[in-house]
Amino acid sequence: MSRRAKILAGVAGALAGAAAGAGAFWALTGPFTNPDQRVGAWTTNGAVGQELQGPYSRARVALYGIWGLPPTETLYFVATKDAAGAVLDRRCVYAVEGGALPTRWWGVTLYRDGFYIANPADRYSWTMTDTRIGPDGRWTLTLAPSGEGQNRLTFGPQDGRFQLLLRLYQPNPGVAEHRETVPVPTVRKVAC
């Protein structure tokens, strides 16, 4: 094979590889996937727990959770940042403020790197049955570096990737199709 033929073969191979890579990228991120949907400081993905779930969603569920239930059973909302867009920081105090949610039952859990955070109170989440809710239906959870108390979750002494997970169990009819209307809690930085 001549030098010119080798160069042409190399260029053709590089073009074919680039085309294959672009095709794979389009297939994984294009119209056949289900991107995250933003709702306030939270994100949600309508494909979790369904057959149409894309490869990135499947990988995330496999890494951070065991089995995603279908949207008729549970809706998942994740917050890794506060309302101002800053990443959750274990040195800061946050107020997670919400009200009535369109579901039969809800819970909020704080994770570090996808796992529960060890704390003296053995408290990993708050739910609508154990959260102190005011007469107006409003409630506030406190995220803080340490300590115990009513409606309080702690970051603990280690750095990591922190995330809040809001689960709506048995959401009201039609909510799964209109997640953007869910009145998700506000994640507000109080002090740092």
Image (tube, rainbow, N blue to C red):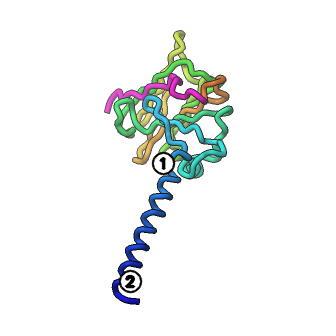
The answer to whether the residues at label 2 and label 1 have Cβ atoms under 8 Å apart is no
Q: Is residue 33 left or right of residue 83?
A: right
For residue 76, which numbered disc appears in the image?
none
Crowd class of label 2 (few under 14; some 14 to 19; many from 20; radius 10 Å): few
Task: Tell me residue 61's x, y (percent).
Answer: 58, 47
Q: Is residue 121 visible?
A: no
Whether residue 95 is situated above or below residue 64 in the rendered picture:
above
Q: Earlier in the sequence, mark 2 or mark 1?
A: 2
Residue 76 falls in image quadrant = top right
Which kind of residue does numbered mark 1 sit on?
A: Asp
Q: Is residue 187 magenta?
A: yes
Name the residue beneath numbered marker 1: 113
Q: Is residue 10 magenta?
A: no
Query: Real-space Cα distance between discs 2 and 1?
Result: 49 Å
Q: For the residues carrying marks 2 and 1, which lies nearer the camera in this image?
A: 2
Task: Tell me residue 104's x, y (percent).
Answer: 66, 23
